């Protein structure tokens, strides 16, 4: 099956090439603070615990999550010393700058590192390996997600791939045709945390499934009757 069949001699410009994730409700954040005086940053960090995790962390491995901070439904995070702060709706860079500014009241040259611990995407439908995948670097394209799932089955509908995304407290659906180059400029070229990719089967496979659901029982019953009749005759 051929992808990107559209002929386009001009180079495509991806508008969101400098993608950075936006923090959302239910994101689980790791926030690490450093400064000139290492002793002074201790109250602003979780204590170090003896839990190790593999690079390939994720739901499939069932590894425990690291210590961190959960963004609540109002976009608020309760941080040591600083208290409740609104980080929901900010990009990671914006959240980092905000925290460093607040911490400068307490620390000399504070540096903040923020990471989304539960950054995950889900691929379902007519693919080789459907599942939920954790993305440690918080940056993945739709094409890379399809690659993680082992690519579409031969019966997958490449002209109507669905991406479901949480936006403004609701769900928004995007439809993508992988046989054209429209994906390169799509807002879902880069997937966001908790995005769901669904690949529907093509019409032939759907028809086959409908046939077996409606006729499978009858065929099995007739086959059993024929076998029983043949057995009686042979005896």
Image (tube, rainbow, N blue to C red):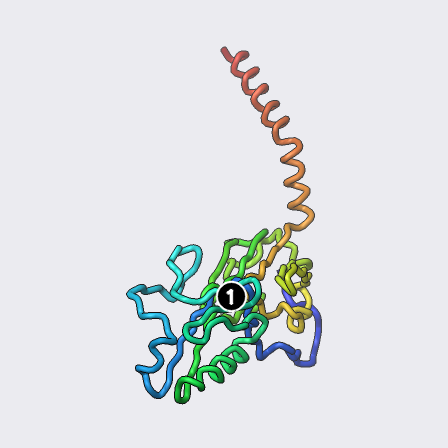
Say above or below: 138 vs 174.
below
* Residue 143 seen in render: no
Q: Is residue 232 above or below residue 105?
A: above
Q: Which residue is mark 1?
A: 71
- The reply, left or right, for residue 139 in relation to residue 8 is left
Residue 40 figure quarter:
bottom left
The percent position of residue 127, horizontal first and vertical second, equals 56, 54
Q: Position of residue 96 (x, y in %)?
A: 49, 79
Name the foreground residue: 116 vs 186. Answer: 116
Above/below status of 98 relative to 76? below
> At x 49% / y 84%, what residue is drawn?
101
| Residue 88 sits in quarter | bottom right
Q: Secondary structure at mark 1?
A: loop
What is the x, y in percent for residue 49? Answer: 30, 66
Q: Position of residue 104 (x, y in %)?
A: 44, 86
Residue 109 falls left or right of residue 94 = left
Instruction: Name the residue nearer the viewer: 200 or 109.
Output: 109
Quadrant in which residue 163 is drawn? bottom right
In the shown orientation, is residue 66 left or right of residue 173? Answer: left
- For the N terminus, give its image quadrant: bottom right
Residue ranking furthest to the left: 50
Q: Residue at x 57, y 75 (%)?
A: 90
| Most foreground residue, 108 or 8 | 108
The residue under the point 32% across, 83% down is 38
7 vs 217, left or right, is: right
């Amino acid at each position: 099956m051929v992808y990107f069949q559209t002929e386009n001699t001009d180079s495509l410009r991806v508008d969101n090439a400098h993608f950075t994730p936006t923090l959302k409700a239910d994101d689980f954040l790791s926030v690490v603070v450093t400064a000139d005086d290492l002793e002074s940053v201790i109250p602003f960090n979780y204590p170090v615990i003896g839990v190790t995790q593999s690079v390939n962390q994720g739901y499939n491995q069932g590894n425990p999550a690291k210590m961190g901070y959960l963004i609540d439904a109002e976009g608020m995070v309760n941080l040591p010393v600083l208290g409740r702060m609104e980080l929901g709706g900010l990009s990671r860079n914006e959240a980092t700058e905000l925290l460093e500014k607040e911490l400068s009241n307490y620390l000399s040259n504070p540096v903040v590192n923020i990471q989304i611990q539960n950054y995950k995407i889900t691929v379902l439908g007519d693919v080789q390996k459907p599942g939920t995948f954790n993305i440690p670097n918080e940056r993945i394209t739709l094409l890379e997600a399809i690659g993680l799932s082992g690519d579409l089955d031969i019966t997958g509908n490449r002209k109507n791939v669905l991406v479901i995304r949480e936006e403004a407290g609701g769900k928004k659906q995007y439809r993508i045709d992988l046989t054209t180059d429209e994906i390169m400029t799509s807002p879902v070229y880069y997937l966001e945390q908790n995005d769901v990719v669904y690949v529907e089967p093509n019409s032939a496979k759907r028809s086959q499934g409908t046939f077996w659901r409606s006729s499978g029982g009858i065929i099995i019953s007739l086959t059993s009757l024929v076998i029983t009749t043949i057995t009686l005759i042979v005896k």
